[in-house]
Amino acid sequence: MVPFGTGTGLEGGVNAVQGGVCFDLSRMAAISELSLEDFSVAVEPGVTRKALNSHLRGTGLWFPVDPGADASLCGMAATGASGTNAVRYGTMRPNVLNLRVVLPDGSLLHTAGPGRQARKSAAGYDLTSLFVGSEGTLGFLTQATLRLHPLPEAVAAAVCSFPSVQAAVACTVQVLQAAVPVARIELLDEVMAGACSRYSRLELPEAATLFLELHGSQQGLAEQQQQAEELVRLHGGSIPAWARAQEEREQLWSARHSAWFAALALRPGCQGYSTDVCVPISRLPGVVVETQRDLRDSGLTGPMVGHVGDGNFHCILVFRPEDTDEAQRVHDFAERLGRRALAAGGTCTGEHGVGLGKRALLREELGPQGLDTMRRIKAALDPHHLMNPGKVL
Amino acid sequence: MVPFGTGTGLEGGVNAVQGGVCFDLSRMAAISELSLEDFSVAVEPGVTRKALNSHLRGTGLWFPVDPGADASLCGMAATGASGTNAVRYGTMRPNVLNLRVVLPDGSLLHTAGPGRQARKSAAGYDLTSLFVGSEGTLGFLTQATLRLHPLPEAVAAAVCSFPSVQAAVACTVQVLQAAVPVARIELLDEVMAGACSRYSRLELPEAATLFLELHGSQQGLAEQQQQAEELVRLHGGSIPAWARAQEEREQLWSARHSAWFAALALRPGCQGYSTDVCVPISRLPGVVVETQRDLRDSGLTGPMVGHVGDGNFHCILVFRPEDTDEAQRVHDFAERLGRRALAAGGTCTGEHGVGLGKRALLREELGPQGLDTMRRIKAALDPHHLMNPGKVL
């Protein structure tokens, strides 16, 4: 049994590799229990992140987790997704308060108990966090109760160019260490900046680039802007021109969210594959530089884009799958990058999940004891291995 | 096998109710892998929260989770503890990056994989969150890798008296809704305010009281103070006299952390029992008022103190255990309060855990399917039921 939401996952989580029945949940699309006082709402699997935020328009609240695609929120919970706002608002995990799950035997589980939505709890094992990121292998998520956030009073976004990727990453590390409460801090390498500029008709220099966004009160924002500018300048970045108007900001972020398509447009007719490593911030500059060198040495097109505030970045490899030699080089590069992240104390998947593609690396990441523990849990909750077979473990 | 840290838990988690072997882990006291760049550190079970913060002195970093007692950090992870700073910095769960666990069969598990400490991960089931709050029923936590936070540039604390508990709670709800990034917001009812005032030699009026603390930049703090003052005034509260000096602030918070002893001093020679419900913010005023009425009707001494920014509050019931009638009234009151919280969509335990005392209520909170799911996980990871028997489930 394979749960299907919007089919926008990147690791083949919805592929029925062993046959079976695929359940399209997209027509379960109710939004309910919106509480403006408790900052919470319940959504069914057919509700996407954009649909929820449209529904919330005018309430002063929003849901910040934003993977590239307009994914189903329950699918995002199943994947453990995040996006550009995670550095400030967290990933899906801290933003899910409760899940309604159909277990493999057909019984109904509410992970935090039926109807519960306390902001914190010490009541037994954290089943909510267990099902977030379970990728359909433990049951069907049929409703998610989500934590909403107040819309910031003021928002400013800016794009800064840097002399090198190292400089942009070093600037990011310092922004975090200075505890500037940055809402978004996204890296594009020179190839990706050029690709996005052409694809979304912006006028970005072909240079390592940071997209920044700050959220705060009017007064607090001015202070954050000043702090950010100082650090950008210190690392040789261009002076940010702050966009305050919503339309202008949306144009920027729409360009960022189109990075996948901008990368594909570099080589029309080719296929894309995205890596997804995440490393401790202190190791980020080294890992990024080594990865760029590896890309060049491998003769691959793989523009880089990343949620660098979390230590998470993607190379979007654009290749011709018919060219078996190139496909093999892509595969080898992705594996080396995964191992490089593991050697740096990181993970092979920051937000895309394991699905089919990362199963081999998962074993190296967790060690035999970690994998065995996960398998015991899988066997305990899905003893007949009915749910999404062949995935994750 | 019962793991023992500092023995400061409140739900009997370390009691060897079925006999067995109790493991005192307090001499495993290493602090290692401190990374000022990654804001992380690893601690063994003998390290308490105060010992860690002493160790961090001068680094510009701190660990904010602060239950009343100077508990072991691994014990706090096992309990899913929180404290006064959770409204801003979260509970133990989001602040644990990795756990080293000795499983019941003696094998060693690293919940996020050996040596890993990425800020986020989508690599399989979230074993870290599963072991946080497992109360020693799944294995021994022998090391926790924790997320540290930058010390705020400026801090201000204040005490405000209100005409009623309702007014203080309503003020709290508005502070949250206005998205003032309050670091601590703690309620004391009139009885507790009087008790703390006498016990810690402060000069608090015997009135419903909020202890507030704000963290920010110098400039940002002024703005927060202004916002908070407006809301306090709007609800009839006394104008806060802000304490900026560390010594003065520490005196305030030491009084708050002594609430347990201040309550016991109300009736010398008596015993204390703390309730621990947590409800959605919108339901907090109603639940608090009903609970105060219930206390009066039951003829019990039970001053109230709470992390009201999370919807979590405690009644510290002070009673003579030899008086079987009073002890029964305490028991009945605690059960009614737990059910009142459940009826309001809350939990019977926000931060103290289930241990022995909350097992009956846990069943009502989770429903049969939730409890059954937890039992399956317990059986999968501890098939011979060796770990902390008789607790939680």
Image (cartoon, coloured by chain):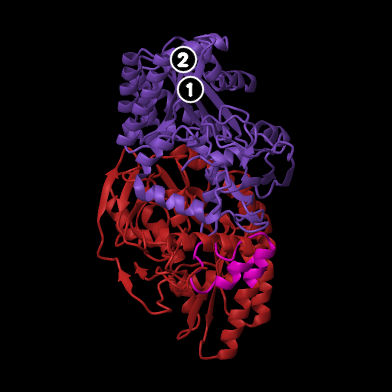
Chain colours: A purple, B red
In this view, the residue in front, B243 or A43, is A43
Q: Which label number is shown at residue A119? A: none
Whether residue A168 is visible? yes
Mark nearer the N terminus (1 vs 2): 1
Q: Mark 2 lies on which chain?
A: A
* Amino acid type at image mark 1: Tyr
Q: What stretch is highlighted in magenta?
A: B337-364
How far separated are the C-alphas under marks 1 and 2?
Answer: 8 Å
Which residue is label 2 attached to?
A319
Q: Is mark 2 on a helix, strand or loop?
A: strand
Q: In which quarter of the image is the N terminus of chain A?
A: top right
Amino acid type shown at disc 2 = Phe
Whether label 1 touches label 2, CB < 8 Å: yes
Percent position of residue A245, x then y: 62, 21
Left or right of B50, for residue B354 = right
Q: Residue visible at 54% across and 54% down?
A: A383
The residue that mark 1 highlights is: A273
Name the spot of residue B254 as percent of width and height, x first.
Answer: 41, 63
Magenta includes B196?
no
